[in-house]
Image (cartoon, coloured by chain):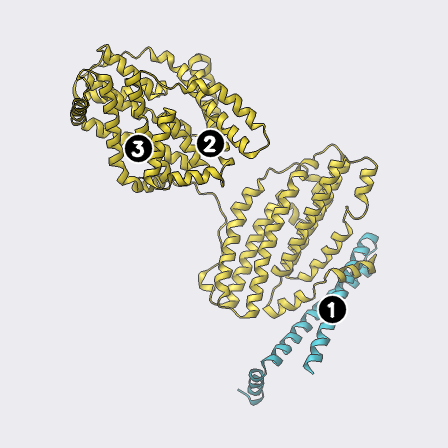
């Protein structure tokens, strides 16, 4: 086992809380990435859609994804603040 | 195939019978009325379950000597062991007493019935219960129309008894024709063959006349006229004792398996007693003579001696059978097992998984998904929709348009079979697994347990909704029909979104349906007021619609809440974070304001 990797494991053992936060950050980023992708797909669909009813539905979906992403970003910021 | 032709064949045979014999018609009608009385009595006793009668019966039959005394006293009072047996069968069918207590009562009834022989012998009288049938029916039916639950129950019991008596009366009337054809002189045979022959005759005569007392009267008359020997008279009495079980057997036709077991216990008891009595008839006769001498009964007073014999041989039967009551109950349970209904059983709850937190949680999640799948079908049918239609990508409006015919479903029965047991197993598994988990895993378990409750609540809401929905989707009023179809479309949409979220493991997707539900609230958007104002729906329809909209919202909310927990995938951290991004009510309203 290489020294830096071993050090990383030891560090994780010594500061379990920090490890937890790291994991959480990673998870948040993953979810936010997913939401970002979803948002992009919806925007693309919206640009191509002509039917007003379907456009309205897409707009709603977009607003929801945006609200969810904002919530996630806020939470991630708060987590990072706590870390520092 | 056989099942399909069984009922028409029975109808054909009965019709042919009715055509060729008016007596047969009377007998069959008697059986039908008798069974109808049994159903009424069961219904009546059900009204008292969980109340005074249950406690009273439990207290008076919780020990063998008590149930025996109960049988003896009630039969002495009613002067009919058959009637006590059929009432006991209905007690048992209504779940008021256990099989062991029922067997005790039957044993007691056999002793109690011997008092009849004493009454006939001593006073030549017999309480004629059939005379009470008409007043019982009248009083019973009046009581059924009362509002009070107890009075209604009492009414059902009284009317049930009335129908029982009436049924027995018609059966007897029908058999009158056969009665005159029995001439006992023709069968005189000496020794054991004669005993068996007369025992069989006794069985036949009692089955035909529906009363062992009537057979006893015939025996006494025949003995007095010296048509038969004393020995053969006793054999007839033994047969009458077996024949009397026919009423209980007919009564058990409409009863559940417990009732059928009791009828079988009755038959076994009386058969065993009969065999003992026939085998040891000369010894019993000697003891009858000894007893007669002791109490001063004349040697040729066959009437009283018959009563002594009846009492002695039934007492012997009880003494022989009592030690084997437990074995008899076990034997009957094995011989006549409870018909297993198809009940959903757990697929993933392996006890070995309890100790490993992650595995236990995944097992519970999968099992709860199984629970949801079962609930899905119930809810779909409750909305008069088929699962495959919901899962298709067909336009919701056209799905609803093509599914206007109500799907017959007993939601409560389906719930008991496919959900309740499974849910109980999940809860039990969770409480066992919980002991070995960290706080974090414990929270997840708590969430999963709540999911089970959400599913159950969604089914209960569907059950409430189903009643009016089935009625109004076929209503002639297009407005109320339209409103109920809107509810169906809404719930179909919820179920589809849930399936999508389940397939993609994306619980955040469920926020979309929340917004849709809010936008389609008929009670809040003024549609309901407009329909009432314009007189398009009645006030009764409006209140039903309001209540049912609320039930439908309950179904949606419970299912969405469930989906947010159950459909999240990944490890616990991932699930928790994803759930934390689900929009709450305020955030949802904010979004709603932005888009409108």
Whether pointer 3 and pointer 1 mark residues with C-beta atoms closer than 8 Å, the reply is no
Could you tell me which chain the residue with mark 1 belongs to?
A
Colour yellow, chain: B
**Closer to us: mark 3 or mark 1?**
3
**Closer to us: mark 3 or mark 2?**
3
Compared across the picture, whether B83 is left or right of B395 comes to left
Q: Quadrant of the C terminus of chain A?
A: bottom right
Q: Which residue is mark 1?
A: A71
Could you tell me which chain the residue with mark 2 belongs to?
B
Residue appearing at x 34%, y 25% in the figure: B244
Q: What secondary structure is marked by label 1?
A: helix
- Graded by Cα atoms within 10 Å as few (under 14), some (14 to 19) or many (20 or more), the crowding at tag 1 reads some
Question: Does the rendering let one see residue B186?
Answer: no
Q: Which residue is mark 3?
A: B268
Residue appearing at x 55%, y 54% in the figure: B370
In the rendered image, residue B84, in percent from the top left (x then y), is placed at 39, 29
Q: CA distance from mark 2 to mark 1?
A: 62 Å
- Graded by Cα atoms within 10 Å as few (under 14), some (14 to 19) or many (20 or more), the crowding at tag 2 reads few
Quarter of the image for residue A50 reads bottom right
**Closer to us: mark 2 or mark 1?**
1
Q: What secondary structure is marked by label 3?
A: helix
In the rendered image, residue B576, in percent from the top left (x then y), is placed at 63, 67
Q: Which residue is mark 2?
A: B3
In the rendered image, residue B393, in percent from the top left (x then y), is placed at 69, 49
Q: Using the image, determine if residue B101 lies above or below residue B201.
A: below
Compared across the picture, whether B7 is left or right of B321 comes to right
Chain A rendered in what hue? cyan
């Amino acid at each position: 086992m290489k020294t830096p990797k071993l050090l990383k494991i030891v560090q994780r053992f010594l500061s379990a809380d920090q490890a937890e936060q790291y994991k959480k950050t990673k998870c948040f980023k993953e979810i936010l990435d997913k939401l970002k992708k979803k948002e992009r797909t919806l925007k693309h669909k919206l640009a191509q859609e002509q039917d007003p009813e379907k456009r309205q539905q897409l707009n709603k979906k977009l607003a929801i994804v945006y609200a969810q992403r904002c919530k996630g970003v806020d939470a991630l910021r708060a987590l990072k603040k706590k870390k520092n | 195939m056989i099942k399909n032709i069984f009922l028409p064949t029975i109808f054909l045979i009965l019709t042919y019978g009715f055509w060729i014999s008016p007596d047969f018609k009377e007998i069959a009608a008697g059986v039908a009325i008798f069974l109808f009385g049994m159903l009424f009595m069961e219904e009546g006793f059900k009204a008292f379950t969980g109340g005074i009668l249950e406690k009273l019966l439990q207290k008076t039959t919780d020990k063998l000597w008590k149930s025996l005394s109960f049988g003896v006293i009630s039969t002495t009072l009613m002067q009919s062991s058959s009637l006590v047996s059929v009432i006991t069968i209905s007690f048992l069918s209504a779940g008021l007493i256990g099989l062991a207590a029922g067997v005790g009562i039957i044993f007691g009834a056999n002793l109690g019935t011997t008092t009849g022989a004493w009454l006939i012998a001593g006073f030549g009288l017999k309480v004629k219960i059939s005379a009470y049938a008409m007043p019982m029916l009248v009083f019973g039916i009046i009581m059924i129309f009362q509002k009070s639950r107890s009075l209604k129950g009492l009414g059902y019991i009284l009317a049930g008894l009335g129908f029982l008596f009436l049924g027995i009366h018609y059966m007897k009337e029908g058999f009158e024709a056969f009665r005159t054809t029995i001439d006992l002189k023709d069968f005189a045979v000496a020794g054991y063959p004669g005993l068996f022959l007369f025992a069989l005759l006794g069985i036949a005569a009692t089955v035909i006349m529906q009363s062992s007392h009537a057979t006893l009267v015939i025996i006494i008359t025949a003995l007095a006229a010296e048509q038969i020997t004393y020995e053969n008279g006793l054999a007839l009495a033994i047969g009458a004792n077996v024949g009397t079980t026919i009423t209980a057997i007919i009564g058990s036709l409409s009863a559940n398996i417990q009732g059928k077991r009791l009828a079988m216990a009755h038959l076994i008891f009386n058969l065993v007693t009969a065999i003992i009595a026939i085998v040891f008839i000369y010894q019993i006769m000697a003891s009858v003579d000894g007893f007669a001498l002791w109490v001063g009964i004349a040697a040729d007073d066959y009437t009283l001696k018959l009563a002594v014999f009846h009492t002695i041989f039934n007492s012997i039967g009880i003494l022989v059978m009592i030690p084997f009551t437990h074995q008899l109950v076990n034997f009957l349970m094995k011989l006549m097992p409870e018909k297993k209904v198809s009940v959903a059983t757990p697929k993933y709850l392996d006890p070995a998984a309890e100790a490993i937190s992650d595995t236990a949680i995944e097992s519970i999640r999968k099992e709860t998904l199984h629970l949801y799948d079962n609930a899905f079908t119930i809810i779909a049918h409750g909305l008069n929709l088929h699962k495959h239609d919901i899962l298709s990508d067909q336009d919701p409006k056209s799905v609803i348009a093509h599914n206007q015919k109500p799907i017959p479903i007993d939601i409560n029965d389906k719930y008991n079979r496919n959900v309740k047991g499974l849910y109980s197993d999940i809860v039990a598994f969770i409480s066992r697994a919980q002991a070995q988990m960290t706080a974090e895993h414990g929270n997840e378990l708590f969430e999963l347990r709540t999911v089970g409750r959400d599913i159950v609540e969604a089914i209960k809401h569907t059950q409430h909704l189903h009643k009016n929905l089935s009625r109004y989707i076929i209503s002639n009023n297009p407005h109320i029909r339209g409103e109920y179809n809107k509810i169906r479309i809404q719930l179909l949409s919820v179920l589809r979104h849930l399936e999508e979220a389940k397939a993609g493991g994306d619980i955040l997707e469920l926020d979309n349906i929340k917004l849709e539900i809010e936008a389609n609230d008929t009670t809040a958007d003024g549609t309901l007021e407009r329909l009432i104002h314009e007189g398009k729906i009645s006030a009764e329809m409006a209140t039903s619609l309001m209540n049912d909209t609320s039930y439908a919202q309950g179904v949606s909310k419970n299912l969405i809440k469930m989906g947010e927990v159950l459909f999240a995938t990944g490890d616990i951290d991932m699930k928790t974070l994803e759930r934390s991004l689900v929009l709450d009510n305020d955030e949802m309203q904010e979004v709603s304001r932005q888009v409108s």
